[in-house]
Amino acid sequence: MKTLERTLLVLGPEGDPAAAAMAAAWPGEVAAASLRDLSRPGWSLVVGNAEHTTLSVNGRRFGAAELGGAICRLGWIQPEALDWIDAEERDYVAAEMAAFLLAFFDQLPCPMLNRPTPACLAGALPRPPAWRAAARLAGFALAPADALPEWRIDLIGENCFGTTDPVLIRRAQALATTLDCGLLSLAMTGTVQAPRFITAHPFVDLGHPVLAAAAAQQLQARQAS
Amino acid sequence: MIVLWGLESDQPLAMVGAALGARGTPLFFLDQAAVCATRLAAVGAGADGADAADGADGAGQLEVDGARLDLASVDGIYLRPFDTRRLPAVERLPEADPQRHAALCTDDALLGWCDSSPAQVLNRPSAMASNNSKPYQAALIRRAGFDIPDTLVTNELDALHGFLQRHPRVIYKSTSGVRSIVSSLGDDLPARAGSLAACPTQFQEFVSGVDYRVHVVGDRVFATEIRSDAEDYRYAARQGKSLSLRETVLPIEVAERAVRLTRQLGLVLGGVDLRHCPDGRWICFEVNPSPGFTFYENATGQPIAAAIADLLARPQCDRIAA
């Protein structure tokens, strides 16, 4: 199957605008999955054998080989989100689903933005001290941790949105490289001349068409390489 | 100064505390039960306005019921905190209660400090998290060179039937470690099939052999051979099954692989669960990042607590990075 014909998997909240934006940007089909799909038959993984991975989205089944890319827009699973599961089982099922998805995405052979981590299915999400230590190492000046964000820098692979300052771009990319993030959003305060880092997270606003297009381009480039 | 963080009733903490006390090592017990009276305070703002209590360089001051500890003076910490949300003092508070919020923030700040501090930390919380997904950790174990049981995680009955055809005996257990009791899949399959779709479940081939728990403490290895007729020896007493533990020595190559695996997982302390098969293979089931080692030490006399105390009290130049 040609690269451009492969399906993009987007796992996110029900009604996630990112799925629609990615559908407009991705040349092939987009399978927009939610947690409810995990309670429909069709999901399977064999540890260490990625070819046997299968998934089911809106009743349609896929094999891992059919995927050209994947994005997980959920960081973790809130038991309250599982309203089709018996209330007394939701804590347990949330933990089980999160554990499954971590293993599932970790061994998915197609490119991902980002690979999951045990702390966050959507990618690196260290606690604030680690973020700030990494940002300091990358060359950022730090604002107090409780400062209110005034603007942001979004990184999608090599593409940077929110600043054209080459020094800031370099620092942001250094931070993303340290944390192995293909998607990274930095909360900033201060002026363009004196910017300061507050915190960061992997939840780039992929509902924005420009950012969605950049993400699609990154995944395709990674598939080709 | 060595910090022990957890509950007074925690036996591993108590044994390590006793071992440190016997050495005369300065010790601070951070009682998790006092979380509502615990604060991480700023030492002073950094030159760039950053909050120095964010622990980015190990700085900060801990206050517990009036007692203060400069975090920069901490050489090592052994942490075994319980889920703060389930502590009686926190659980009884309404969701929106500011005291509850403060307790959870303190908890998170302490975990963040543990992740970033230059002290010897047993173990860094971010490294321990891999154990929250058994198949994820199993993949890491496999990449580190250990055999693992054939493992299927699925909510698809056809996939399970295919797995059962390949393996005459199958066990199932939780994927996350919550409610983790190993059970054989047998006559209860038809009854469980209906609920399989609700959430992927972990199935493994049953592998016969002799169980070993290997405690890796830094670069030291304490191996215990376990013989039991229970499916899961941890519950043998509860089930009225037989159980015997004895200290043993692993083949050097297996011991070294266990140490390497622990380190590759970002851990300094680990409980590695192995099974030695009749065909000679060494299967690894998991690495417990916060092993309840007292069960094994009490049965065999292996000086695991003393080894942990030794590791915590090492001078900075001898600390083990993970």
Image: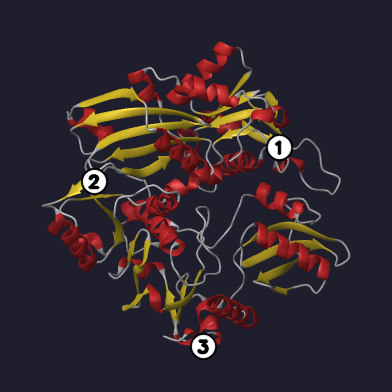
What's under tag 3, amino acid-wise? Pro
User: Disc 2 on helix, strand or loop?
Assistant: loop
Check if mark 3's residue and mark 1's residue have beta carbons within 8 Å: no
In the visual, does A188 lie left or right of A111?
Answer: right
- Asked if both marks, 2 and 1, belong to the same chain, the answer given is yes
Distance Cα–Cα, label 2 vs label 3: 46 Å
**Marks 2 and 1, how far apart at CA:** 45 Å
Residue B58 circle label: 1
For the residues labelled 3 and 1, the Cα–Cα distance comes to: 48 Å
Q: What residue is drawn where x is 42% and y is 57%?
A: A98
Q: Secondary structure at mark 3?
A: loop
| Image: A191 above or below B237 | below
Provide residue B277's location: percent of width, then percent of height: 25, 41
Kind of residue indicated by mark 1: Gly
**Viewed as shown, does residue A217 lie left or right of A71?**
right
Which residue lies under the disc numbered 2? B207
Amino acid type at image mark 2: Val
Q: Are marks 2 and 3 in contact (CB under 8 Å)?
A: no
Quick check: can you spot residue B96?
yes
